[in-house]
Image: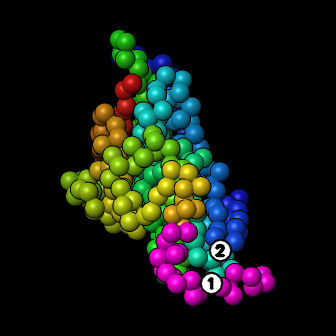
Amino acid sequence: MERIPILRMGRFLLVTVQVDLQDEVVQALQDDLTAKIVRYGARGVLLDISALEMVDSFIGRMIGHLAAMSRILDAHTVVCGMQPAVAITLVELGLSLGFVRTALNVEKGMKLLNEAIANDDPHGLLDAEDDERPL
Amino acid sequence: MNVLSDDSLEIRRDADVVACRQAVRARSVEQGFGLVDQTKIVTAASEIARNTLQYGGGGTVRIQKLADGSKQGLRLVFEDRGPGIADIARAMTDGFTTGSGLGKGLSGTKRLVNEFDLWSKPGEGTRITITRWK
């Protein structure tokens, strides 16, 4: 079974979904992502779905679960790059993903994550020594 | 109305759901569907194919390219010999699920297509026919 790669970028994890998602690949991603959030103390997850040509209710639910799990592990999630046709279809299907933060692209998603983290910690007290810890 | 092509695929495993999506995408492109129409029929196919697998214990899908005068369409017929649906009206309700889903599958799928037909008999199986016209 193929696995979706998770890249570490400082305090963030970047997940770029490039394959046509099979259900078991989605399950594996939940396991891998939560493990990496904990291992790296990641504060944010960027889920880039620009290559996804469709999101059905299963994948939509997976996205919601990933965001909820990450939040419990003290990381914010931003879903970015959704194709317009996917957004139209998703809303007609009845999934608005209203509880998931979204951005048009990775760059804007990164900005949103930085803002979310700054709001968590307005005085910058938490991250000072955390950032440079060895892997 | 003419049937221009008629393919059949097995839905037995997880990977077959992906294969079904890809086949539906290819046929919808051949029919000249725009990107939004393609996405809608592919998403509808994914929903029903997963139902066929999860609730029907596997089955088949027939993919038919249709032409009706100047209109072009795609019809998908999903069939399984699973336990069937006891209460169809309830199964079609937004939010109803017997599984772990959100209960958007059937009612949501109906909104993505132009024609939706569900036949089911407890103990005999389920047949869902969906059609989208360009």
Pinpoint the chain carrying mark 1: A
Q: Nearer the viewer, residue B5 or A1?
A: A1
Q: Which residues make up the magenta segment?
A: A114-135
Q: Quadrant of residue B40?
A: top left
Residue B17 x/y as whole percent: 54, 49
**Do the residues under discs 1 and 2 have CB atoms within 8 angstroms?**
yes
Asked if residue B123 is among those painted magenta in the image, a careful observer would answer no
Picture mark count? 2
Q: Badge 2 is on which residue?
A: A11
Q: Is residue B21 left or right of residue A98?
A: right
Q: Residue furthest left?
A: B89
Residue B35 x/y as whole percent: 48, 32
Of the two numbered discs 1 and 2 on the same chain, state the one appearing first in sequence.
Answer: 2
Q: Residue at x 37, y 17 (%)?
A: B71
Q: Quadrant of residue A106?
A: bottom right
Residue B55 x/y as whole percent: 42, 59
**Chosen colour scheme:** rainbow
Q: Residue at x 51, y 63 (%)?
A: A112
A103 w.r.t. B129: above or below: below
Q: Residue furthest top?
A: B69
Label 2 crowd bin: few (<14), some (14–19), many (20+), radius 10 Å:
many
- Which amino acid lies under the numbered mark 1 shown in the image of this protein? Asp
Specify the quadrant that holds the N terminus of chain B.
top left
Q: Badge 1 is on which residue?
A: A127
Specify the quadrant that holds the C terminus of chain B.
top left
Tell me whether marks 1 and 2 sit on the same chain.
yes
